[in-house]
Amino acid sequence: MRNEPRTQRHTEHSGRPAGAVYADRGSSHFDILLAAMVTVVILSGIGAAKGVSFGTIPGTGFEILTDGGFFLFPLAYVLGDIVTELYGPRAARRAILTSFAVSILASLSYWVLIALPPFPDAYGLAKQEALELALGPVWIVVLAGLAGFLAGMSLNSLVVGRMKSRMGERGLVGRLITSSGLGELVDTIIFCTIASRAIGITSLEQWAQYTILGVLYKVLVQYAMIPVTSAVIRRLKRTDPSYQERLAAAA
């Protein structure tokens, strides 16, 4: 038993088809993907503290409301898809929890930074006020982002893992489409509900517009990036020795 490939042992004990193989996290790719995901989550939390309005769609009364993290956050889900597909749900959970922990550390750092006494001159006091305005509400946005990301990304990873366990290497695009829609829907509803007041949204109508636009935008961005995401996944699979070894052993 000791010399059997890990994939075969896992198949015997869990009943998972041999086609659902994953690379070793010791691969040089995982640390890069993890660092990128953590960075995206932290920067998105800072950016999301700023409410953004692109005006109203003529003739509809629908206001285009979003936040400053809108252009960056979908990348976190793209990276999550890559990690799950290549390294498995367990590695994805590790990446999610690491992002969670580092975001909390960042939020605590902002709190300490604001609490430190500024220079007493006019410039120092002006910078202190600016920091309080810019970073003061970030902890609420970070909390909202963590709650949404934890729920949405966990669902996203679960869907990818379950579908891959049934289909093996087949159906990659289908996994990405299904998981992206469900994960972003749950994430955006949770995030917008908690963070809306922190970024200046005060009415139910604004919340609805903010949430609807957020879901549509994030899902469409992920769908538009599926050709790139799938190409990256396939390339990483081809170049990862541990993945190729386990794929050959499962054949």
Image: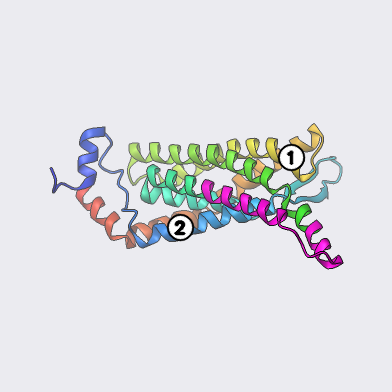
**Residue 1 in view of the camera:** yes
Point out which mark residue 114 bears: none
Q: Residue at x 78, y 46 (%)?
A: 64
Q: Which residue is mark 2?
A: 33
For the residues labelled 2 and 1, say whether their Cβ atoms are less than 8 Å apart.
no
Q: Earlier in the sequence, mark 2 or mark 1?
A: 2
Does 20 sit above or below residue 37? above
Q: Nearer the viewer, residue 203 or 43?
A: 43
Residue drawn at 58 percent across, 47 percent down: 104
Residue 113 in magenta stretch: yes
Pick the quarter of the image with the N terminus: top left
What's the residue at 23%, 55% (across, down)? 245
Q: Is residue 251 visible?
A: no
Left or right: 114 in relation to 36: right
Inspect the image, locate mark 1, and give the three-letter code of the amino acid beneath it: Ser
**Classed neighbour count for the residue bearing mark 2: other residues with Cα under 10 Å, few (<14), some (14–19), many (≥20):** some
How many labels, in total?
2
The residue drawn where x is 35% and y is 45% is 170
**Residue 225 pos. (x, y %):** 54, 54
What secondary structure prevails in the magenta region? helix
Residue 239 % position (x, y) = 33, 63
Quarter assignment of residue 236: bottom left
Would you place residue 239 above or below residue 6 in this image?
A: below
Q: Badge 1, how many Cα within 10 Å: few under 14, some, many 20+? A: many
Q: Measured from the top left, where is residue 169 in percent x and y?
A: 34, 47
Task: Write down the region rendered in magenta.
Answer: 100-129
Q: Which residue is mark 1?
A: 196
